[in-house]
Image (cartoon, helix red, strand yellow):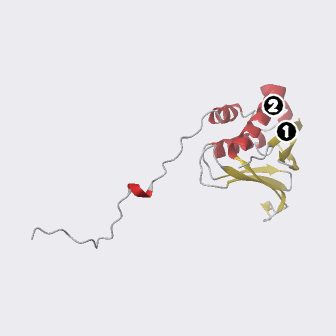
Amino acid sequence: MTSASISIDYDLGRSGWSKFTLTVGDRSTKVGAFSYCTDALGDLVRAALAMATGADRAEVRLDLEPDQQWLIFQRANRSSGLGGSCSVTVLELEELDGLPQRPGRALLEATARVETMARAVADAAQAVWDRHGADEYSTLWMGDRGFPLSALRALQCALEVEDPAPYESDPDDFVYTTGLEPRETDD
């Protein structure tokens, strides 16, 4: 499978409003600006970590106040860990009385390798860390959580290890019986 490239250009912004541009292959969308009401970068890193370590699905909710955007990763096959591919979907949902109105409008729908997606998230988060560090991140983001350094380090570690391939059974390894086979007798 040819892997679509992914890039995330993350702009931490100011006063608790961030945004990023997500590009998958030749498709691109702007995500945000979203507020500090969620742990946006931390949630994104933890979603990538979940997918990199075998989750079938991970979601990130971004609060646009009052609307929402959701970034959804869905494993496209039964492979685990970094293997295989996942769909990458960005949905925009209008909010009415505090509840998102589904199904929402798809801003981007694409498919990429899980490893490619997880590396793009790790690279984007590392770029934010390199540019701002802990203190400036906290000052600019203004959320109740600091930079997700432990989640980023866990994701980077997960990217260094490929899970072993699962056992694939050989049909010749099994003896199938119906229980109707003739019995041997001592006559």
- Residue 101 figure quarter: bottom right
Residue 91 in the image: state x and y as whole percent: 81, 57
Q: Give me the disc on residue 165.
A: none
Disc 2 element: helix
CA neighbours of label 1 inside 10 A, class few (<14), some (14 to 19), many (20+): some
Image check: 184 left or right of 136? left
Residue at 36 percent across and 64 percent down: it is 176
Residue 139 in the image: state x and y as whole percent: 84, 31
- Residue 181 figure quarter: bottom left
Residue at 67 percent across and 31 percent down: it is 153
Disc 1 element: strand
Residue at 60 percent across and 47 percent down: it is 54
Q: Which residue is mark 1?
A: 10
- The front one of 86 and 146 is 86
Q: Which residue is mark 2?
A: 127
Cα–Cα span, label 2 and label 1? 8 Å
Q: Earlier in the sequence, mark 2 or mark 1?
A: 1
Residue 115 in the image: state x and y as whole percent: 69, 42
Residue 69 in the image: state x and y as whole percent: 82, 54
CA neighbours of label 2 inside 10 A, class few (<14), some (14 to 19), many (20+): some
Q: In the rendered view, tell whether residue 109 sits above or below residue 30.
A: below
| In contact (CB < 8 Å): disc 2 and disc 1 | yes
Q: Amino acid at mark 2?
A: Ala
- Dividing the image into 4 quarters, which one contains the C terminus? bottom left
